[in-house]
Image (cartoon, grey):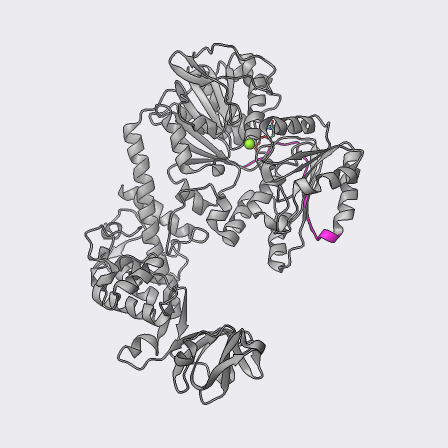
Amino acid sequence: MSSPENTTSPLAAPVASVWGVGEERARLLARLNIFTVEDLLLHKPRRYEDRRKFLPIRDLKLKEAATVRGKIVAAGVKRFRRGARAMFECVFDDGTAHLHCRWWQAQPWMEDWYAVGREFLIFGRPDSLKPRNMDHPETEFMEPGEDEFIHVNRIVPIHPLTDGLTARVMRTLVWRALEKFENQIEEPEWSKLQVAGCKLQVEKPAVAIRNEPSTFNLQPSTLLPARANAVRMIHFPNELTDVEIARQRLALDEFVALQFQIQSRRKKFEAVSKALPCGGDNRLMKPFLAELGFKLTAAQTNVLRDIRADMGSAHPMRRLLQGDVGSGKTAVAACSALMALESGFNVALMAPTEILAEQHHRNFVKWFEPLGIKVHLQTGSRKDAPLQVEGCKLKVQKTVVSARKEPSTFNLQPSTLFIGTHALLTGGFDLPKLGLVIIDEQHKFGVAQRETLVRKGNYPHLLVMTATPIPRTLGLTLYGDLDVSVIDELPGGRGAIKTFVRAADKLPKVWDFIREKITAGRQAFVVYPRVEENADGLKAVTKEFEHLKKLLAPFKVGLLHGRLKAAEKEAVMAEFRVNKSQVLLATSLIEVGVDVPNATVMLIENAEAFGLAQLHQLRGRIGRGAHESFCILISDAKTPDSLERLKILAETNDGFKIAEADLKLRGPGELLGQQQSGLPALRFGDLAEDLNLIRQARELVAKTL
Ligand code: ADP
Ligand code: MG
């Protein structure tokens, strides 16, 4: 729970201490994750109804949501033929007109509940006006009683509910909780402190926080309410505009609590850890750069300056490197690795897929072995007999990609780069004298995995790299304990990428186009969402493979998906890399890392099945050579929304813009992928919208810690 109260707070009392909550209701509330009084107080309404005046039924408009108030003048069950299914219908009258309401599945309790003469509030969208009709509206029985004032003549909250708990009961419980506990809601510590130089100041007598124009999206004159006021306002606002003010106040508390966690973790870490001296002396770097074949971009050089400073400083590096696909993060990783290697330490590089690990292995063997550095590959499908060397368990085996034979004994002088997948993390595998851990495509790993790898060493330096541009809101929360560097420039000499969104009936033309490009010597990726066909009707690579082979003959098509064995995958990639196959039919498996500069066309079908950030990643596989590249997104999505969504990709190549759009459209969990753990549970904070609040919280905590 993100609240500032500790467990001795009266608000931590079980929700049953609210009058009216017995065993049964406590059980229902538990379904909504409401266990304590505080949980109930922070149960955020899902919408509000302005019940200060009701719309006359006569004035209802087609398809427009509205609340009306009426008495039932007729009601009854209508049976369909054979009587198997029954519909319940009743007619409300408010003196201006009648409103018919229908429920397509009559329930046994309805006849008693919706009895003639009873008065209800009805919320819904009329689907016809002649007669006026709503299907399945939300209703609330206007029970005459002393707590009437809670439910009408004001703006009322409609909370998330569960079967057996009505909006009215929930509202009553929240009201009672407020009456009994409101004055126990304390200001959190941060707002009691007068933080020097901070824009947020609590005014004595500590109820209002002045809002500076630059700090919130509110009007300059607005005062942020005290926490207790905000809690009341979020349920029972005086005006609808109060809701957002209250939400921001409560969200700020959440973000501050989160920043406290993040920043104190970092502080603690710095207190216990001493950095290994890994600044390097350039003796490997110089020959490496001379042989590399290109000059580092200014952005790459700047980032390396940050990294060198970190690796030579008193605290271990904790750095996030963000760079759009193709910005050249691998070269930066290589230079960072060299700094540690020059300093006499080993380095581990972790990649999310075997394909990527093997691609890195190939590159690094080429780059590092001439410098006398061993490059060792460790992936899930390469688990040969473990080898005991000088007290160190290492699983050494021949690799398919490196023709060179692995030595039968492993020389453990600190000059080894270990490359692997999560297999690097599995138990029993020690990484000796580890100076630097590099994690590629961080978003594919959880925070916990990151920590596991780091714990393998004695506080090694950590560099995490990601091509998913992380919107700043997420960066500051999820990666708030990391310093951030950005490569904001692509290496020159790249052809432009053009992106098109097309309906499926344009496919024949698209295939003609692809054939033309292949004939001219280029290669193409074709991406489908599924490996095997299933009920969702999305295209599957295994099903389309034969068809594609025929369609594109005499050109050769390779097939790549996650269910192939590692050796099979590697063989397919090897063919494509040297243009023995011209088309690679693949799943989103190729999303990360794959680097074949001659591939200049990417066709993605059922594009609506992918997230925007993911499509951007996929698109990053092309545009890596000097030729102009083309990305064609095919979608027959029925909703205009999803076409609009895809158009964002056609309009911009800027990963940050795309990620931000994706975050807004699909939320942080989807953007970051299933594996991502460590997303904070926020009730009021919004990771897509609250950048200003998050910044405020971060600044505030930095000044108080
Ligand atoms: P990503 O940041 O997506 O991991 P890579 O490291 O795979 O990108 O780099 C993409 C391509 O750009 C590679 O072929 C790499 O060799 C090349 N590259 C990297 N840096 C430069 C540079 N400074 N100049 C020219 N090409 C570069
Ligand atoms: Mg990469």
Above-or-below relation of 645 to 346: below
Looking at this view, name the residue that lies furthest to the front: 82
Range of magenta residues = 486-505
Tell me the residue at 58%/22% (across/down). Answer: 363
In the rendered image, the vertical position of residue 410 relative to residue 619, given as above or below: above
* Towards the viewer: 353 or 49: 353
| Residue 130 in sight | yes
Judged left or right of residue 68, residue 381 is right
* Residue pictured at 34% horizontal, 27% vertical: 315
Q: Is residue 362 magenta?
A: no
Q: From the viewer's perspective, is 306 left or right of 296?
A: left
Q: Relative to 389, is 21 above or below?
A: below
Where, by quadrant of the figure, is residue 310 drawn?
A: top left
Q: Nearer the viewer, residue 381 or 244?
A: 381
Number of numbered discs visible in the structure rendering? 0
Q: Is residue 589 left or right of residue 97?
A: right
Residue 659, image x, y percentages: 53, 46
State whether residue 236 appears in this view.
Answer: no
Q: Quadrant of residue 21?
A: bottom left
